[in-house]
Amino acid sequence: MTDSFRYPLKQAIEPAAVLIPHALGLLLRDACVVLFFLIHLQVFVSVPIKLNGGPLPGLGFVWASGSILGLGLALTKPLRTAAIALGVFPFVALCLWAYVSSTWTANPVDTLRASTFMTCSFIGACAIAAHLSWEEILARLTLSLGSLMILSVGLAIAVPSIGQMTDILQGAWSGVWGEKQAMGMYAALLILASLALALSNRKYWPCLFLVPLSLVAIIGTTGKTAILMSFMGIAVLSVGWLVQKDLRVAIATLWTTIVVGCVAIYALTQGKELVFRLLGRTPDFTGRTEVWREVAYVADKRPMTGYGFHAVWEDQTSTAGPYQWIADGTGFFPQNAHSSWLDVTLQLGLPGLVLLAACMAIALIATLVRLRNGGPGALFAVSALATLMMISFTESILMSSMDMPWMLVMLIAAKSMQELLFPTSIPMPRPFPNRGYVHGRRDIAPFPPKRPFPR
């Protein structure tokens, strides 16, 4: 009798010795990914600030922890992470240009710190793309966003002093975040992630309850931007889902989308007043045009270099800084440029604007190339990217140090490029070692002996 059948306990212990460390490693990796997402959702910063009523010392440890997590995930697969990062080289160039801006900024320490955090965020996004499939990414993203959205809705209803805004826009839901815009934006992204996850595997159908919950959250925020994001995201996801069907359906869908898009553009250009009235907006975008005018004027003073990454809005006390010029021109104190593209031009000049456009272009091209055969992951990628690009013209969500929208753009670009560069599926580690072939006579037959045919 061979050792395998003589010692059944040994046969059971050997696979367990390999399987248990493997399972613990996967659990640790997933915990790091979820924590990485939560840090970029800024919940560990916004909640203490809301409870304290103002900033607290030591919150920079949160960003340092996110940087360590991103680097740690990359070190487990360094070659694949580096290959993906080189595939989306405009993001690498943008990070390097942010570092270079520290040579002419008025606050080099803040610029270097913010550039380091953004670089670590980019490395972490590439590492997640190297480790996980789209289904796994969507599952962990839905877990992070869904848990925070449930908590936010509960706080807004049960504890209004924490879950609702109390200073400006009193009564609007903000949840665990400091502003209603953040809660509305993440609720819209949660709708897209939940739908794509349910399409990827039927076992995730229970997560569809997050869709009506997110709609309730969007209504509670009273934000028009989140409603537009939801409608546009669902429309793009639906069009992508039809494109992934039969080729004839895909062609008909594309032509219908082109016609509807042209009609929508014509209606928006001819009936702007009616559109603003329906959206409850003013033609000046709630005072944004004043900010845009002053930001563009200040940016023209340094068109090629800008004023340095994270060196404008963080320095609101210096009388000689560019922020005071913007505040004097607008008559109030804006917290950002309310436009990602103008914000980047103000901080990094025309080269930074060109690099940002290249980053968004490569992300969009990679997602569109993968749309036909990319499955639900490609549906989420193209719909989320479309919604983020839409609001990037009225909100400063791109090119940030460690924030979820910009990290999500980098993750979408990295994962789409990973599928183009390495089209095979991500290999999963074998839970059991390969066993050698047993030569010689077998003492026990692999199958029970056949019963004799009755005569």
Image (spheres, rainbow, N blue to C red):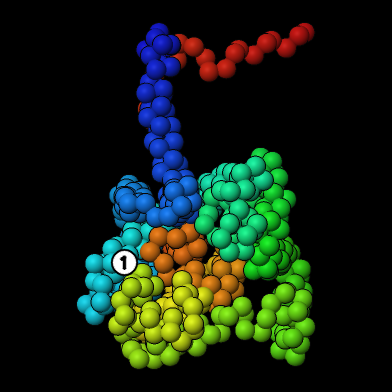
Q: Position of residue 155 (x, y in %)?
A: 61, 45
Q: Could you tell me if residue 298 is visible in this image?
A: yes
Residue 356 appears left or right of 165: left
Residue in view at x 64 percent, y 14 percent: 450
Task: Residue at 50% x, 88% y: name it.
Answer: 293
Q: Position of residue 353 (x, y in %)?
A: 42, 82
Quarter in which the N terminus is drawn: top left
> Residue 183 is drawn in which quadrant?
bottom right
Please name the amino acid that badge 1 sits on.
Answer: Ser
Q: Residue 313 is drawn in which quadrant?
A: bottom left
From the viewer's perspective, is residue 280 above or below residue 421? below
Taking depth in this image into account, of 198 and 50 the one nearest to the observer is 50
- For label 1, the residue is 115
Q: Secondary structure at mark 1?
A: helix
Q: Nearer the viewer, residue 23 or 7?
A: 23
User: Is residue 300 or residue 99 the one in the foreground?
Assistant: 300
Residue 404 spot, x, y in % from top left: 48, 59
Q: Position of residue 119 (x, y in %)?
A: 33, 63
Residue 99 located left or right of residue 195:
left
| In front of the other: 330 or 12 | 330
